[in-house]
Amino acid sequence: MAHFSANVHEDIKKVLITEEQIRKRVEELGAQISEDYAGKELVVIFVLKGASIFFADLIRSIVVPIRIDSIAAASYGNTTKSSGTVRIEKDIETPIEGKHVLLVEDIIDTGLTLSYLKAYFERQKPASLRVITLLDKPVARKVQLVPDYNGFTVGNEFVVGYGLDYAQRFRNLPYIAIPKDYVWNDEEKE
Ligand code: IMP
């Protein structure tokens, strides 16, 4: 049996980015995107599941017309280490040829997932393709990749909340945080 508290907030050691900080930054990013794509239509594609909460907040700060879609790509199991392999588990339904595309990611770690997805979308010949990430972990990068828009830069530690999980947990936290130490051992206890 995994150890977890009845209240998910009790399993948190430290809050790194507060709800208020996220809200402000998401509004800034939405305003910037609205300015950059003024007069254009945008296809906003988010990467399941981690980017879902960021995406939901972000699009409500964008004022240019958009269409939405999602893609699911797996490169991680229930661990904190990248497996290095990327697999598309759910594809987009929108034809993106000739469209302006914005890809929404939760966090760029090694960069392997996103560089794979970027190449995958480039082959479909969009008019433009940009990447936005809520969090960037540049020190963990294995391939060169710089996001076009970045919410916050974090260090080389595993973070959860606001859509990001550890072993599928903690996505419902409204802030970005580090769990208590016993959480990392849960897999072994299960
Ligand atoms: P990358 O391919 O190594 O860049 O990994 C990207 C994916 O790994 C992200 O979309 C997340 O799902 C997951 N990931 C990487 N670092 C973290 C983290 O600190 N917390 C939660 N998920 C993470």
Image (cartoon, rainbow, N blue to C red):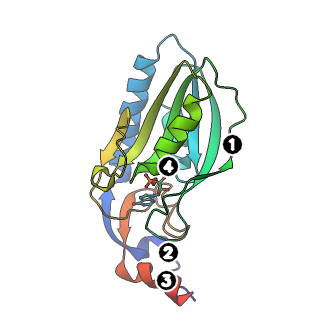
Q: Residue at x 43, y 30 (%)?
A: 30
Q: Quadrant of residue 1?
A: bottom right
| Residue type, numbered disc 3 | Asp
Q: Secondary structure at mark 4?
A: helix
| Residue type, numbered disc 2 | Asn
Distance in Å between CA atoms under marks 4 and 3: 26 Å
Nearest to viewer (mark 4 / mark 3):
4
| Residue type, numbered disc 4 | Thr
Tag 4 residue? 113
Tag 2 residue? 7
Q: Secondary structure at mark 1?
A: loop
Q: Residue 101: image x %, image y %? A: 55, 27
Tag 2–tag 3 contact (CB < 8 Å): no
Q: Is residue 175 left or right of residue 64?
A: left
Q: Could you tell me if residue 57 is visible in this image?
A: no
Circle on res. 91: 1
Distance in Å between CA atoms under marks 2 and 3: 16 Å
Q: Dividing the image into four quarters, tell me where ligand 1 lies.
A: bottom left
